[in-house]
């Protein structure tokens, strides 16, 4: 069985190779290690290995973990990313530790975030999550509705729109969805050039995502291994 250090180094090497093959600057690609279902001790081990970005998808698990990590890592530089669907009534709690929200996916969440950041002295980084299916009931903004929704985000002073986020389907070639994400990113940049980042790519498909311009990779099990909780 491989160790955490071996898995982390192996994924880092694969990211390096994929970036080189795509003719991209490796420094423009950020690895967000998804630590859901794993204890704070694993996050601390990853910090020692050089990881600085960690992702969670449930506030109930993430908040106490973040507090535990903070107490054990005073003075260390790292960031928490919230990558799952965020309930509007959990926004205030999540913003106590998360500095990036990858899943701004609906009007009600935008309204909750607008209220929560009114009195902030610094901006909150956000990605707009895309719905890559034909099911309007799924989370995310349809690509055709991206621009009008983005305009509302951009009108909120304390929200910093980084770009778009998407999850490729498991039942088809991920390149299909990554091309849709890349096209949506181009549309968004026509509206706001600074929103040039793409959160895409997971354990199974991150190398393909890199070919299509992903800047933030959300990789969990390939690094963390089997769930510990």
Image (tube, grey):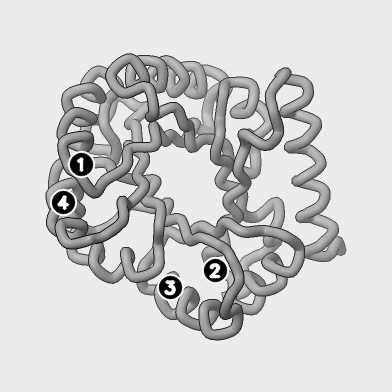
> Which quadrant would residue 76 be assigned to in this image?
bottom right
Q: CA distance from mark 3 to mark 1?
A: 23 Å
In this rendering, is residue 65 above or below 37? below
Q: Which mark is residue 106?
A: 1
In this rendering, is residue 84 above or below 139? below
Circles 2 and 3: CB atoms closer than 8 Å: yes
Q: Which mark is residue 114?
A: 4
Circles 3 and 1: CB atoms closer than 8 Å: no
Task: Give the mark nearest the N terminus, 4 or 1.
Answer: 1
Circles 2 and 1: CB atoms closer than 8 Å: no
Q: Which residue is mark 2?
A: 37
Task: Please state the horizontal and vertical placement of residue 45, each as a whole percent of the image.
Answer: 71, 72
Give 1 or 39, whichever is nearer the viewer.
Answer: 39
Task: Give the mark nearest the N terminus, 2 or 1.
Answer: 2
Q: Which residue is mark 3?
A: 61
In this rendering, is residue 160 above or below 130? below
Instruction: Tell me what residue is drawn at x 33 percent, y 21 percent.
Output: 188
Q: Nearer the viewer, mark 2 or mark 1?
A: 1
């Amino acid at each position: 069985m491989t160790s955490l250090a071996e898995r982390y180094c192996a994924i880092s090497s694969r990211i390096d190779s994929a970036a080189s093959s795509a003719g991209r600057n490796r420094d423009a690609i950020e690895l967000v290690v998804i630590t859901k279902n794993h204890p704070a001790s694993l996050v601390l081990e990853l910090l020692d290995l050089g990881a600085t970005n960690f992702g969670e998808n449930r506030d109930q698990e993430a908040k106490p973990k973040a507090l535990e990590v903070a107490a054990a890592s005073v003075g260390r530089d790292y960031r928490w990313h919230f990558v799952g669907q965020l309930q509007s009534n959990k926004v205030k709690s999540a913003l106590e530790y998360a500095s990036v929200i990858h899943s701004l996916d609906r009007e009600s969440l935008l309204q909750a975030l607008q209220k929560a950041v009114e009195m902030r002295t610094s901006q909150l980084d956000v990605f707009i999550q895309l719905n890559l299916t034909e099911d309007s009931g799924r989370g995310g903004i349809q690509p055709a509705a991206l621009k009008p929704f983005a305009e509302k985000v951009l009108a909120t002073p304390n929200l910093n729109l980084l770009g778009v986020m998407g999850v490729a389907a498991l039942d088809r070639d991920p390149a299909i969805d990554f091309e849709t994400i890349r096209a949506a990113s181009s549309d968004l940049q026509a509206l706001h050039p600074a929103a040039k980042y793409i959160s895409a790519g997971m354990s199974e498909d991150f190398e393909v995502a890199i070919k299509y311009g992903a800047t933030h990779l959300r990789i969990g099990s390939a690094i963390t291994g089997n769930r510990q909780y």
